[in-house]
Amino acid sequence: RYYAGLELDVRVLSSLNGVVSVERLDERTLVIRADRKGWLTNFFASVLRGGAAPPVGEVFERDLLTATIVETSSDGRDLLAVRFRLSRRLEDPKLLLLAWDGEAFAPLDLAAVPPGQSVTLADTSDVWASMM
């Protein structure tokens, strides 16, 4: 919003320290997976929330997307995988997906990824390195 100088509809789908992959399922659906706990239990998220993660199968519907919990940690306190079904196709020019590449946010062209394949994003497991 700041850089564009416009009021934009922005959604953060995940923010954690770990290795994250994104799998394209079809023209509107993707799954974000984390290799460890930290989606809901990282330091910053813990300041705002506590308790158990939503159970597997729980669905959250919003205008732009529907999120379904796919996998939680063994202790039930964190998410490990969430499926997102977008209201727009991945190749829609009005949709911009960004991912942290280790140095900056960069466009993520999931429309170019064949269905059923995953893209591994930057390793942000080192908290201090990811903040610098």
Image (cartoon, rainbow, N blue to C red):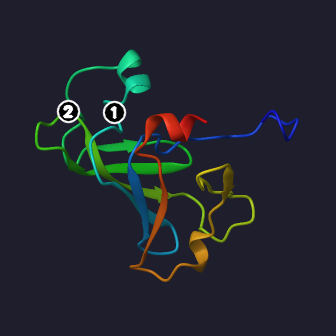
Q: Residue furthest left?
A: 74
Residue at the bottom extreme of this rendering: 114
Who's the residue at 19% across and 40% down the image?
55
- Relative side of 20 to 12, left or right: left
- The first of marks 1 and 2 along the sequence is 1
Q: Which residue is mark 1?
A: 40
Q: Label 2: which residue?
A: 77
Horizontal side of 109 relative to 55 (left or right) equals right
* Picture quarter with the N terminus: top right
Give the total of numbered labels. 2
Q: Residues within 10 Å of mark 1 (few under 14, many from 20)?
A: many
**Residue 93: mark in rendering:** none
Picture quadrant of residue 10: top right
SS for callout 2: loop
Mark 1 in CB contact with mark 2 (< 8 angstroms): yes
Residue 47 is left or right of residue 86, and the answer is left
| CA distance separating discs 1 and 2 | 8 Å
Q: Residue at x 60, y 56 (%)?
A: 101
Amino acid carrying mark 2 in the image: Arg
Q: Amino acid at mark 1?
A: Leu
- Picture quarter with the C terminus: top right
Percent of width and height locating residue 92: 69, 67
Image vertical order of residue 50 relative to residue 36, above or below? above
Q: Nearer the viewer, residue 40 or 5?
A: 40
Identify the residue at image location x=40%, y=45%. 125
